[in-house]
Image (cartoon, rainbow, N blue to C red):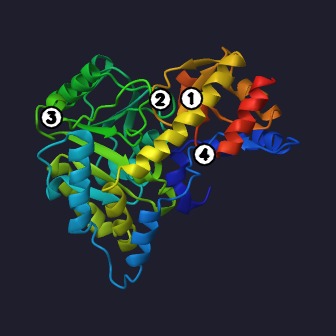
Amino acid sequence: MSRWARASANLPVFPWDTLAQAKATAVAHPDGVADLSVGTPVDQTPELARRALEAASNAPGYPTTWGTPALRAAIVGYLRDRWSIRGLGDQHVLPVIGTKELVAGLPLQLGLGTEDLVVIPSTAYPTYDVGARLAGCRIQLCDDPDAVAGRPSLIWINSPANPHGLIAAEPLLKRWIEFARDQGALLASDECYGEFGWDAEPASVLRPDLCEGTPENLLVLHSMSKRSNLAGYRAGFVAGDPDAVDGLLAVRKHAGLMVPAPVQAAMTAVLGDQTHVDEQRARYLRRRALLLDALIGAGFRIDHSEGSLYLWATRGEGCRVTVDWFAERGILVAPGDFYGPAGEQHVRIALTATDEQVAAAAERLVSA
């Protein structure tokens, strides 16, 4: 290993690299591949975002790390109007260069290290683990505040969850909030899939009745990638505890972590519009219904999947066996072991494919 790559020594193999053979099998299908493995949006970026980006494209100066006043106001307004979160101001919000960047960097940017414990869900987006590893933190997988062993510094929760789509019940959210405050920990709630609740309505930990009207010890993360098909723009934001936001802002100023000015303008535009979100939600709902029926007809059980952009499917066998079964039919899905040992008998099936690909996958499943 290169002496310049020591940071990578503590990281797992990049999970998608392990899908190479299954991908080759799926691609070789005579009717082509239906790729349902990655949560990458495929539908059009809203016109209002593109217009705003173009209008702001003459940007010779450096953007501000904190974001423009218009963007900060748009974030506060979105959280108020969509999520019933009151009492936030400029000091509570911060744009980020896509939320994956913040998830991976949050422990380091908070100054955590080898003495700190980070709690993450037992089945979870791998970058929570990666961020803790990069900072050298100790890690515990846990889904219940009563089962946490030790005194954590940072706690990750995710609702609706990637990969399995579970929407956390409000009593559980309250328990996590109370536990984090009791422990002096920061509760980071990844709410990037919040617009996509299907069988239940997601709630934000910053909702006043859940957090007792104060953002103390709480951060929420939101992404424009899923909500507004802006994955290529790298646009998101974090909001909550003003002390935590101020600390992140200070570090990010020094590190030059700035959302580009045209992207800030596009964010401002899409945060003020719910119509395009409703249209995208309807597309995903149609795809979900088609795949859900086809999977059940093919003998799969769908667990959780109350929200987010995935179906969490199993037929009681090792996930890599299931991945190969799909690949033989020209369908690529993600193995559940990407997301922790608890997912070893599941596969994650994404709704983020074209209508044509979803229809092709459903037809192949029906005839399986």
Which of label 1 and label 4 is nearer to you?
Answer: 1
Residue at the spot 58% in from the left edge and 28% down from the top edge: 289
Give the mark, 1 or 3, whose residue is nearer the N terminus: 3
Q: Secondary structure at mark 2?
A: loop
Direction from residue 24 to residue 259 in the image, left or right = left
Which of label 4 and label 3 is nearer to you?
Answer: 3
Direction from residue 276 to residue 89 in the image, left or right = left
Direction from residue 185 to residue 278 in the image, left or right = right
Which of label 4 and label 2 is nearer to you?
Answer: 2
Measure the alpha-carbon separation of dots 1 and 4: 22 Å
Q: Secondary structure at mark 4?
A: loop
- Which residue in the structure is indicated by mark 1? 311
Give the mark, 1 or 4, whose residue is nearer the N terminus: 4
- Image location of residue 139, percent across then percent down: 40, 33
Give the mark, 4 or 3, whose residue is nearer the N terminus: 4
The image quarter in which residue 38 lies = top right
Q: Which mark is residue 165?
A: 2
- Image location of residue 110, percent across then percent down: 27, 50
Give the mark, 3 or 2, whose residue is nearer the N terminus: 2
Q: Which mark is residue 14?
A: 4
Q: The disc labelled 4 sits on which kind of residue?
A: Phe
